[in-house]
Every structure is written in C-alpha cells, then in structure tokens.
Image (tube, helix red, strand yellow):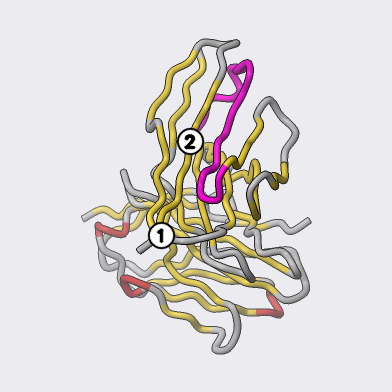
C-alpha cells in the first residue's frame, strides 16, 4: 500500500533562517506531488505541484520554492523565512493520470519568530 | 479560475441532528467533486467523490452528497450526526483538463454529545 511521510512535524525558526520541509511517498511510481498551505478559515492554498522529477509548477509567487530531486521526494524550501511564512504545510500525492484523489501527509507546523 | 464557496464556516449541532454543508463552485463545464474531512489530530482524508454517473454519492460513515449541475452545488449531508463527526470539512473541485483540485475555505463542525 502507498504511504506518505512528511517531516519535520513541527518547526520553530527565526526570521531570516532557511527552511527545508521534506515529503516522500512509498508504494507508487511517478506520482503527482503537491505542497499546500492550510491557514485557519482560509482553506488549502496550492503552493506547488509536480508531475515528474525536476518539473515544478508554482501557483503563488512568494518566498518559497520547491524541488523534486527524486521520483517520490518533494522538498519545500526557503532561503530566508518571513513571519508571514508561518503556517501548516501539507504534502499530498495523487496518481499521475486524470482526476484523482489526493492523499495527504500529516503536515508540518511552521512557526517563524 | 475555478472558485469554491463553502458558506457555513462554523456549524454546531447536537447529536442526532441532521447536517447539510453547502458547497458551490464557479466552473460551468465538466467537474470532478470531492469532500475531504480532517478529524482532530488526523490527516486530511477523502470522505466521498463524484466523477460521473449517479449524482447522489455515498461516502464513509453515512455521509452523502448530491451534485446538482444547474445549481453548481455539491452539498454534503448526513441524516443523524454523531459526536465523532466533529471535524473540519473541505469541499474541492477539479475541472476541465486540470486534475488539480481547488479547495473551499472549510467548515468546522462541532457535535455536542
């Protein structure tokens, strides 16, 4: 069966520090991968998605970037965090073709101080 | 761009009450519709989905949703809620040639025993 792992679960970082959140999927090949940010009362905002290694699409211009160095690995990064980057970040995957169900990770709570 | 509206942001019910959560979307063509649920401390997970066929779809735990194309709606219903239904509920829609769902803002449901 497929599983999705996301870490770290909780992170407290100072303003201006770098960020790296990692997500890996097991049990499937060539998944579509997604990074969402969940803010209270604002739903899920799509940040990045990827249909293959090295292929990243950005939905919202901001202080963050994403990379997919391996088929089942998706990384969310920042060189210098802002206070506004605080939030709950969710990684998700879906099958690579057609309209499909997203399977979400447990999420990473980022607090920038 | 596709937009999804969930009009009820916070709903408080007593056990055995009936539930209906509204979801409306803006795209007029072919759509795929989803309800996701996030129970306290758990991953966001699929509750039910509609791709085609019978517009009344049934999901887990006694939930159902009805796709009404003329009203651009996909409302979630349950005839008798339980305390364990306390969670946040998200409607999502993907449309046209895009497999990427757009999420609503979510509805927080609290069920009192």
Label of residue B38 in the image? none
Q: Residue furthest left?
A: B113
Residue A83, image quadrant: top right
Chain ID at mark 1: A
The residue under the point 41% across, 59% down is: A27
Q: Which residue is mark 1?
A: A27
Q: Is residue B112 above or below residue B26?
A: above
The residue under the point 58% across, 88% down is: B53
Whether residue A23 is in magenta: the answer is no
Q: Is residue A45 above or below residue A98?
A: above
Residue A109, image quadrant: top left
* Magenta region, residue range: A70-87
Give the class, few, some or many, for how many residues have Cα within 10 Å of label 1's Cα (few <14, many ≥20). few
Spot occupied by residue A52 in the image (x, y as percentages of width and height): 64, 53
Q: Is residue A20 above or below residue B85?
A: above
SS for tag 2?
Answer: strand
Q: Nearer the viewer, residue B104 or A74?
A: A74
The residue under the point 48% across, 52% down is: B107
Q: Which residue is mark 2?
A: A22
Q: Residue furthest bottom?
A: B54
Spot occupied by residue A82 in the image (x, y as percentages of width and height): 62, 17
Q: CA distance from mark 2 to mark 1?
A: 17 Å
Whether residue A78 is in magenta: the answer is yes
The N terminus of chain A - image quarter: bottom left
Q: Residue furthest front?
A: A70
Spot occupied by residue A113 in the image (x, y as percentages of width and height): 50, 12
Q: Nearer the viewer, residue A23 or A60?
A: A23
The residue under the point 31% across, 71% down is: B61
SS for tag 1?
Answer: loop
Q: Earlier in the sequence, mark 2 or mark 1?
A: 2
Residue A2, image quadrant: bottom left
């Amino acid at each position: 069966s497929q599983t999705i792992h996301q870490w770290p679960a909780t992170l407290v970082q100072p303003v201006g520090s770098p960020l790296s959140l990692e997500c890996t999927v097991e049990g499937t090949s060539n998944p579509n991968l997604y990074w969402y940010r969940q803010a209270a009362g604002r739903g899920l905002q799509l940040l990045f998605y990827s249909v293959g290694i090295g292929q990243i699409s950005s939905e919202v211009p901001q202080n963050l970037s994403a990379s997919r160095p391996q088929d089942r690995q998706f990384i969310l990064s920042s060189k210098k965090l802002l206070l506004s980057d605080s939030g709950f970040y969710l990684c998700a995957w879906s099958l690579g073709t057609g309209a499909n169900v997203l399977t979400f990770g447990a999420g990473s709570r980022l607090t920038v101080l | 761009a596709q937009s999804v509206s969930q009009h009820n942001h916070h709903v408080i019910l007593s056990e055995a009450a009936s539930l209906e959560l509204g979801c409306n979307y803006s795209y007029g063509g072919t759509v795929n519709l989803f309800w996701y649920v996030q129970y306290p401390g758990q991953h966001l997970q699929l509750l039910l989905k509609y791709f085609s066929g019978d517009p009344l779809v049934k999901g887990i735990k006694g939930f159902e949703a009805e796709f009404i194309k003329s009203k651009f709606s996909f409302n979630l219903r349950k005839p008798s809620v339980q305390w364990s239904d306390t969670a946040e509920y998200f409607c999502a829609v993907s449309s046209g040639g895009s497999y990427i769902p757009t999420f609503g803002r979510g509805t927080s449901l609290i069920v009192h025993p």
